[in-house]
Amino acid sequence: MSRKIHIFDTTLRDGEQVPGAKLNKRQKFEIAQQLANLNVDVIEAGFPCSSPGDLDAVREISRHVRGPVIAALARAVKEDIDIAWEAVCEAQRPRVHVFLGSSDIHIQKKLRSDRKKAMEMAVEAVKYARGLCPEVEFSTEDGSRTEFEFLCRIIEETIKAGASVINVPDTVGYALPEEFGELIRRLRESVPALDRVILSVHCHNDLGLAVANSMAAIRNGADQVECTINGIGERAGNASLEEIVMVLKTRFENYQAITGINTQEIYRTSRMVSRIMNIPVQPNKAIVGSNAFSHSSGIHQDGILKDRTTYEIMKPEELGIKQQTLVLTARSGRAALRHRLSEIGFTLDPETFERVYNRFIDVADRKKEIGAQDLQSIVEIEVSKVPETFKMHTMQIMSGNKMVPLASVTLERDGELYTDAATGDGPVDAVFKGIERITGITGKLRDYDLKAVTMGRDALGEAMVRVEIGDTVYSGIGSSPDVIEASALAYLNACNRYFANGGAQKIQSSGEFKS
């Protein structure tokens, strides 16, 4: 008989700790709604004590997102727990998630304490949280490096105190699959009280073993896995939700375990998280990478044409990847565009549709045919746009192998046009500096990614950037058949995120926008 594995998604908490991936309330809510469509069991919506904005976002998700448990993280202190409960108290199914370091290195170096005091702190925190919330999860932070007997005792005592979920994390990604699986098996044998609660694991990917460790834990008795979309998260990331789910589905006979995940929503969720957080998915990423169902070898192509199962162990349709050719041109009207959008799963409000249509016409004028992937990129960028303090109007580039690149940029703000020019180390650098001269922003480019959305010489280019402005990293995304324009739109998108986040907005008499 198969058993149920609970999927605890921490994209909005641990996943958001990636530099430059900070989300606003609207973006968090949009992802949470999609996670509910994906049918995850738990959404860890945030760490409310970290900022008033995160508290507000978690509260909004708790009020309106139905289906999954809505969890909020808290340190083992009353103030954190109070704020976490305030954030989730209106949820249909609330959970307060309390954590405390349990390894000697965390207790001694981070907490400046000892095991006895740590035990008392954990028990008191769980009791207090249980007095507020009907469901409390307790995490033994750095559990995989915790002395086994102490780990057993702190788990026993926190269950007695009222924890209904116990989480054993591999916080620093140090464990190996065989030893982590053995740890879970030994805990099951040594702590009978675990039979009354949900036993969870949370694995990090520092050695590239997060999914392997999670699967070993499931095989040895874990009931819940904590994971993120696309495996994003602190440092090298977390266990990847889509990989865990599809391993259990594809190799069911080995695990005899199921999840409740609607796998047809996996690809859409992956794209949404990548787009909103501006974190590209590597092409060879398992399950959701652009090459996951691509075949270039002649032998492979021949086999696929005869029978897809020769080289594919999963059907793309299971993940919501539509294998069809959708072609639009500049002559396609609104009705045709709306029909095509519906076919690939987008229903847009009138205002958003008009933005998408105008962008579609602009791209189609320069690109003969617009395929499904082009259209998806256009829609995702338009839907996720922040308020545009500045809009791109025109740009001109002079560049060559024997001259210093020069860019002239014109931006629009409140109906007025501002033009400036700059030189750079290359045409893209020159455009970025032109944008900075107009906006008054001085940014440090921390990351730059450029990829083709589709095949062919007229492929739509999609650029993603991370720009450090002040002490904060802002991400930006842009697409265009012209890669320099795509890069410029991405950089401008990052600047607009800075302004939307409270950046100074004062036009100087010189015509420059100064921060």
Image: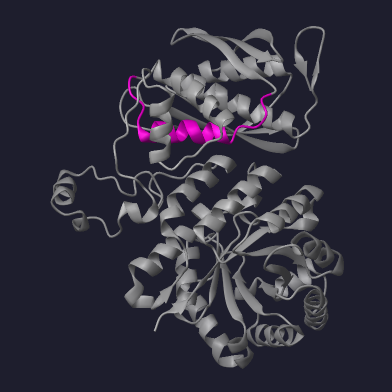
Q: Position of residue 170 (x, y in %)?
A: 59, 69
As drawn, 176 above or below 37: below
The C terminus - image quarter: top right
As drawn, 514 above or below 280: above
Q: Residue at x 54, y 59 (%)?
A: 206
From the viewer's perspective, is 320 left or right of 422? left
As drawn, 47 above or below 103: above
Of residues 264 and 129, the one drawn nearer to the viewer in this rendering? 264
* The quarter of the displayed image where residue 69 is located: bottom right
Q: Going by the picture, which residue comes out furthest to the right? A: 79
Q: Is residue 460 visible?
A: no
From the viewer's perspective, is 151 left or right of 173? right
Q: Is residue 279 visible?
A: yes
Q: Residue at x 40, y 47 (%)?
A: 289
Of residues 26 and 104, the one drawn nearer to the viewer in this rendering? 26
Q: Residue at x 58, y 36 (%)?
A: 384
Q: Which residues are magenta?
A: 368-388
* The quarter of the displayed image where residue 330 is located: top left
Q: Residue 6: within the magenta?
A: no
The N terminus - image quarter: bottom left
